[in-house]
Amino acid sequence: MKNFGFQLVLCIFVAASILGLALAAPARASVYAQAVSTDTPGGPAPFITVLDVGEPAINVRTGPSTVYYPIIGLLPIGATATALGTSPSQVWIQISYAAGPGGVGWVYAANVTLSPGFLPIVEPPPTATPLVTPTIDPTLAAEFSIAPTTTRMPTFTPSAPLVVPTFSNTASPSKGFPMGIVIIVSALLGVLVFGVSLVGRR
């Protein structure tokens, strides 16, 4: 009886395992099919649609950079174009653009939406070389070059010692009548005259 119960449990476990594998197989197949449709070549060519980024149109450039490649045209909001590839950093998308060199152009990926599809990595085109390479005329540069002149540093020369003049009193003492006595006598005469005048008034 115990063997029968064990066999029953074993059969139920095996049946459940087979059922689980059967249900999981279609899901795996569908995931693999989606991966193949987006990551491998084949199927309809992907295209871009210009988003509303606050401007009436977005720039189309000759290469994937706003610094090294000039603008060759504009795409208005809602416009579509066939996507041909992406830059190695996947920040720019190469599109089919008749006005561009070789019939292609580049747009910034953040300004567009991309339909599902495979996009190969495309190396950026060579940057345009400047028409004139700036050079410096050595004759003109020599006119503005100032050669430092070697001058001797000033040497310190001590000044002559300061001579303080000294003065001696050479005036001889006055031999005349002392002025103090003259003042005292004048004062006594004034007092005497004042007293006489008072007596006369009485």
Image (spheres, rainbow, N blue to C red):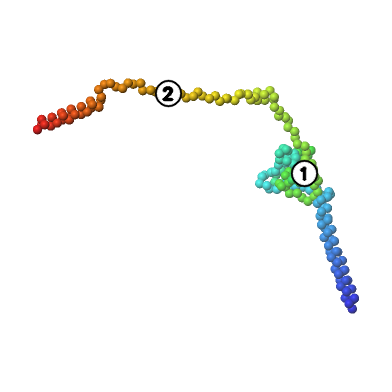
Percent from the top left, x then y, of residue 89?
Answer: 76, 45
Percent from the top left, x then y, of residue 20?
Answer: 84, 65
Figure quadrant of the N terminus: bottom right
Would residue 186 be found to the left or right of residue 59 on screen? left
Q: Is disc 2 in contact with disc 1, using a CB cutoff of under 8 Å?
A: no
Label 2: which secondary element: loop
Residue drawn at 70 percent across, 43 percent down = 58
Task: Mark yes or no: residue 74 visible.
Answer: no
Q: Which residue is nearer to you in this view: 47 or 62?
A: 62
Residue drawn at 26 percent across, 21 percent down = 176
Residue type for callout 1: Ser
Residue drawn at 25 percent across, 25 percent down = 179
Assess disc 2: are there few (<14), some (14-19) or many (≥20) residues with their C-alpha within 10 Å of its C-alpha: few
- In this rendering, the answer to whether 33 lies above or below 20 is above
Badge nearest the viewer, 2 or 1: 2
Figure quadrant of the C terminus: top left
**Residue 87: which disc?**
1
**Residue 165: which disc?**
2
Percent from the top left, x then y, of residue 32?
Answer: 83, 56
Label 1: which secondary element: loop
Would residue 190 be found to the left or right of residue 80 on screen? left
Residue type for callout 2: Pro
Percent from the top left, x then y, of residue 73?
Answer: 72, 39
Assess disc 1: are there few (<14), some (14-19) or many (≥20) residues with their C-alpha within 10 Å of its C-alpha: some
First in residue order: circle 2 vs circle 1: 1
The number of callouts visible is 2
Task: Mark yes or no: residue 87 visible.
Answer: yes
Q: Residue furthest bottom?
A: 1
Q: Which residue is nearer to you in this view: 137 or 98?
A: 137
